[in-house]
Image (cartoon, helix red, strand yellow):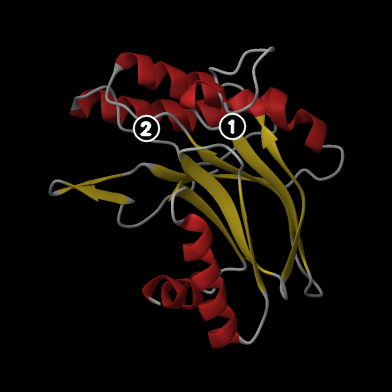
Amino acid sequence: AWLACSIIWMNVDVLAVQENLSKKSKSGWKEVRGLLEGMTGVSWRWMPQRCGGMKIGFLWNANRVEVQQVKSLKAFNVRAQLSHGPCAGGLRPGFYAYVQSLQDPGADFHLINLHLKAGLTVLALEERQKALNRIDKTVKPFLSQDEDIVILGDLNTMGAGDNASRKSELKYVRRMVFKETPGFQDLSIAPRCSSYFRGRGRWLDHIL
């Protein structure tokens, strides 16, 4: 009930979800959808990615937006080789959808949900950077349909175990995504944290 009320309070039409634990998620999201529909009087849809472990997914208000062409983007899983499926190596591929507003006038745009590798190691940091470096090649086929692209989710910009590398990774992400075609801006948030762990706020989630 708390989650359903929070979603209604945020007044979102489409929500990108990360860290959706698989064991009880089916019954949990069924309950959330039922509460949302009871409170709003409109239809809500939930679609998780089919990878195991911590799934990502989309939740949307079906009376306000249409979510189409949903698919996994293998390129954002840096451990998935040509012969492997998009969910290989325990990492998550990107989750793509084309969103069209049912309002008139209304927005339409490409939406990519990401949950990059967590970890306070140099290897984990390099895997996150490698994934983001694939943005331009991955979105290039979408540009002929629509140049409006939103990439968001848990980018896990936590550095490699020290405060200096955390700040460096944040700066690097902003510079990198700006250079990725067609050019992305990392939207500012206030306060500058999206995670609170062991008494410290960190900025892990981003909207590009």
Q: Amino acid at mark 2?
A: Leu
Outermost residue toward the left in this view = 199
Mark 1, other Cα within 10 Å: few <14 / some 14–19 / many ≥20: many
Residue 93 visible here: yes
Mark 1 or mark 2: which is in front?
1
Q: Which disc number belongs to residue 170?
A: 2
Mark 1 and mark 2: Cα distance apart in space: 21 Å
Number of on-image labels: 2
Q: Helix, strand or loop at disc 1?
A: loop
What residue appears at the point 36 percent right and 27 percent down from the top-left corner? 169
Quadrant (top left/top right/bottom left/bottom right) for the N terminus: bottom left
What residue appears at the point 65 percent right and 23 percent down from the top-left corner? 85
Q: Amino acid at mark 1?
A: Pro
Badge 1 vs badge 2, beta-carbon distance below 8 Å: no
Between disc 1 and disc 2, whose residue precedes? 1
Q: Which disc number belongs to residue 93?
A: 1
* Viewer-nearest residue: 40 or 27: 27
Residue 193 visible here: no
Q: Helix, strand or loop at disc 2?
A: helix
